[in-house]
Amino acid sequence: MTIKTRTPAFLREALCVAIEPTYFDLEHYDLNPAQIIGVVKNEINANAVRIGMFSHQGYTYYPSRIAPSAPHLGARNVLKEFENECRKQDVRFIVYLNSKWVTDLYLHHPDWRIIVRGKPFSHPDVKAKLTIYPLCPNSPFLDYFKSIIREVVAQSRPAGIYIDNFAIEPFCECVYCRRAYGRPIPSRRPWASPDVQHYLKWMTLTSRRLARGLVKAARSRNPHQVVIFNRGQFWSPFPTFTPEDNAIYAHRIANAIHTEAAVRMYNETFEHINEVCAFGRSIDLPVLTWVEYPLYPSYVPPSPAEAKIKAAKVIANGGRPMVWSLPCAPMISRAGLPGIKDVFSLVARHRAIFNDVCWESFAAILFSSRSVQLHAEGDRVKMGEYRKSLVGAQALLLHNHLPWDLILDEHVATDRLNGYCVLILPDVAHVDRRQAEGIRRFVNGGGNLLATYRTSLSDAAGRPLPDFALADLLGAHYERDVGETLEAWNVSYARFHADHPISNGLHGALFPIGGRYLAVQSEYGVATLLKRCRYYCDYPQPETSYPAVSARRYGRGRVVYIPGQFFRFYHDRGLLECNRLFRQIMTWFSNDQLPILTNLPDTVEVTMARTRSGQRILHVVNVSCDKTRPITEIIPVTNRFIKIRGACRQAVELASGRSLRLRREARYAIIALPPLTGYNVIVLK
């Protein structure tokens, strides 16, 4: 996917704050824009602020001829007040606009509601005005919302218009969707049927067309008005909100997107921040993403340590942080703000180090939207289960301090693979002809491939093939699924029987495996599956005739194929044996020349970038912390080193300006790291 980026400079350098737009309690709180922007500017050192002006309840915070004003707004025009303060204090002003929730319209126009499986998307008994209820963009609400957008840009000149979560709800059955589709809305099953696939394509293209109409409204006064769409999560079981769809919104429809890396709100791990920012790199965009300030479900602020970690992780992975939500009411403490300011101030002082850099990566993980959708079939639970393989692959690279990228389906058939040492296919069920040719070309030219489970075993409709499309490359032929024999997710064993670099120290030993496995035939096996153990794996059972791991050379490259759910197993169990095998595979792939060697624990994250002037930048984020929430303490990591492959004559810690002890060894520069207590940035000269 070749897309020329046109992201405005201020967004590529944004250090942003988001003021939660759901509800300003103007009755009990004296909203003071000068004070709030003062906090944004002085207590955080942010350079942009996003503030809601059309709330989740459908209220405006300015005098509107279209929508009801917020309770107790009176004669105030909060839109102009914030705009003026941002101009005075040199902070970019981004206006948030809710794209689907209006309580009054929901109550008075039942036909405008989203209808799924014959029922309104939200419960129709609306009593509390604070509850949010969605309306369908195919209904007349869209014209209402466009008029709000035009009204806002007529009354103000914001740096950006931020449109929240806009798209057609999949399989909405409202009268307007049925009318626009021109035929009955199909059920979700069978997923691969022509009816369902035709509908999904229509839904995606129609959402894009409607979104372009919103952008046109936003640019009704200024043709260069910056527009940002909130795309929620970047992955989805539906064609909307996929990475490829997000790239269209970011580059061809609007100027940028925001994705939500909410750790507490969505019960995600801290590693999800890395994933979201890696997605941004895959579509050539430094995406805006959340750094949560209040913690869901209550407004409990993070400590400075936790706030600093979140902001640092976004910066260290190439994203742009958006702090959500700044304290703007008496109940929300400012206690954690110094942690954010530490990061924002460092970035503001050294713009060339953090902005417009290229990221160095050793491995590429294929995020295959086609395979995701074939597996999930529109089911979010299945999507979550499938995603475990992707997250497990990311975790193994992260825990081994190996820089990685996400790449997309279209990248595999292009020269995007050039420059990577390793391509990882975590259960990528469908590989089309062009992708297969690209993968073979990559490996034949000296690249390395690690593939797992059902990779290339499905056709475009999700039906199983008689053999792997990449059978010649994997050196394996499909025989049958032994998942039922191995009993779902229970742990069993394999035994390494071949002397091979990836089985160093494992020869003859039992190796724990888990999840589902395929029975394959391969002459390149280095480990063999054992029959499933009895309950709790109390005695090892006889060997099967099926390999658990195979390793081979192909052209100038190398291939390891694991016919089971290796990455999902690591996600679920986190076994050190899996980490050891993975590291030995990566070492073999790199000819014993991994880009980073270190004695850091896996709670410390390392990424690398290169500036336009050629300086290499090492980002080190210490996520060694207590188990409390919010985090109260970062556990210092001391007396550690890091070996970086490549030439380096000096290493300087950016914050202190202090040179670090450095020596050379073969092809590596060995750097003695300073005590790590949060976020360290090291410039290699």
Image (cartoon, rainbow, N blue to C red):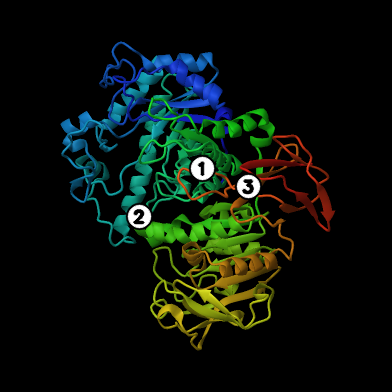
Q: What residue is disc 1 on?
A: 632
**Measured from the top left, where is residue 473 in percent x and y?**
59, 71
Query: How many residues crowd mark 2 within 10 Å: few (<14), some (14–19), many (20+)?
Result: few
Tell me the kind of residue under disc 1: Thr
**Measured from the top left, where is residue 685 in percent x and y?**
79, 41
Residue at the spot 31% in from the left edge and 15% down from the top edge: 63
**Measured from the top left, where is residue 195 in percent x and y?**
29, 56
Query: How many residues crowd mark 1 within 10 Å: few (<14), some (14–19), many (20+)?
Result: some
* Rendered image: mark on residue 636: 3
Dividing the picture into quarters, in which one does residue 286 lie? top right
**Measured from the top left, where is residue 312 in percent x and y?**
58, 40
Tell me the kind of residue under disc 3: Pro
Tell me the kind of residue under disc 2: Arg
Identify the secondary structure beneath mark 1: loop
Residue at the spot 63% in from the left edge and 28% down from the top edge: 348
Q: Of tags 3 and 2, which is closer to the observer? A: 3
Horizontally, residue 73 falls left or right of residue 481, namely left
First in sequence: mark 2 or mark 1?
Answer: 2
Q: What residue is disc 2 on?
A: 380
Q: Where is 454 relative to 650, above or below?
A: below
Q: Of tags 2 and 1, which is closer to the observer? A: 1
Q: Residue furthest bottom?
A: 542
Distance (Cα) linking label 3 and label 2: 39 Å
